[in-house]
Amino acid sequence: MRNEIVLVVDDDPEHLSLVERYVSSFGLQCKSAGSGFEAIENLKTENISLVVTDMVMPGMDGMELLKKIKRHHPHIDVIVMTGYSEQYSYIDVIQAGATDFIAKPFKRDEFSAKLDRAFRERDLLSELRESKEKAEAASRTKTDFLCTISHELKTPMNGILGFTWLLSNADLPPKEMEYVQLLGQSSNRLMKLINQILDFSALEARTSSTKPHHFHLKDVFEEIFVAAQPRAEAKGLLLHHEIDEFLLERVLFGDQFALQQILYNLTDNAIKFADSGQIDITVKKSMVLSGDTVELQFSIKDQGCGIHKEKQDAIFEPFTQAEGYMTRKHEGAGLGLAICAKLVDMMNGEIWLESRVGEGSVFYFSAQMHMA
Ligand code: ADP
């Protein structure tokens, strides 16, 4: 037997007592009210789970009562009893927030099925809500943990990098110098990973937001080239960029550093996954949204290994790589694109790709900016 109280509201005493009998016969506690006003008073004092109300009543009709219940007691389910050819349709009743409706006259079994369904759905919803709350709490704990641990790791890592740099400038025998260089490479890789985890967890926890200021696109591209050119050259790759004439001289207002980070990650991947050819980075204005807001579309094209069609959707998820763990040739934790996706989202844009295995990939993203 359920420990629930059902409130039946009907101005017709005969129908009211019939429905009352039905409710009690299902082992539920029943309260009754002869009008909408009486029902409202009952709701203030009793712990009601479900209201079954007639539609046509003098003073306050079922629709008005339903709206009042949904406004002041949104957790209470309401089943509306409607007669044929009434002012309100089934759609009106459901849109106003009713759980269900039942056409009068109805049989005991039909009513029992409606009550059963209302309670089942409520149980299911509360289970779902509970699991969602648990999952969100677990995810918050995980994000906090990642944030704290990566922050704590950075301090000793800075020490290791600093002393490695001092050692690399010391007068060491060749063998030891080689060890120091290897130590430097590994430390830099580890630092990159720590920074990625920190960035990702901050974005996941939404503790970072866009920090807009005025900038020129050509400065963004210059930064990317200074950072990426040496690696591209070392692999014999040609870096090429093209900025839409319209944008070249414009002063933009937006998050320059988020934009730089996305472009850098995508260019870095293009260099990592290509062994020959050219890498083209382009930007054009895709549309003027309103007044001074424009949407820019960026593309980063390489002639590298490409990505299998079935892997393409998943690669924006964190810790995901297109290559299998055992067959991987390249380093990385699968966080770069997940960070890009979150940053793009922060700039009200979208990120997507076109890729063919053996031919190369083009990563596109859009971002909204203001023109100064
Ligand atoms: P990682 O740091 O592991 O490279 P990313 O999130 O940047 O992580 O990329 C995820 C995966 O997507 C990569 O491991 C790779 O399999 C695939 N990928 C990304 N960019 C390219 C590219 N330009 N060409 C081919 N594969 C790519």
Image: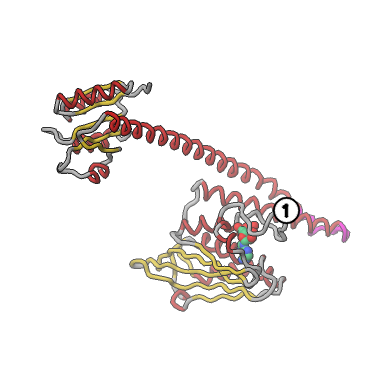
Q: Residue at x 61, y 73 (%)?
A: 279
Magenta residues (range): 164-175
**Residue 173 painted magenta:** yes
Percent across and percent down for residue 115 are 32, 31
Looking at the image, is 245 positioned above or below residue 227?
A: below
Using the rendered view, name the quadrant where residue 11 is placed. Answer: top left
48 sits left or right of 88 in the view: right
204 sits left or right of 16 in the view: right
Question: Which is nearer the eye, 124 or 208?
Answer: 124
Looking at the image, is 300 positioned above or below residue 96?
A: below
Q: Read off the residue under disc 1.
A: 187
Question: Which is nearer the eye, 124 or 133?
Answer: 124
Query: What quarter of the picture does the N terminus occupy?
Result: top left
Q: Residue at x 58, y 63 (%)?
A: 309
**Residue 56 painted magenta:** no
Query: What quarter of the picture does the C terminus occupy?
Result: bottom left
Question: Which is nearer the eye, 24 or 198?
Answer: 24
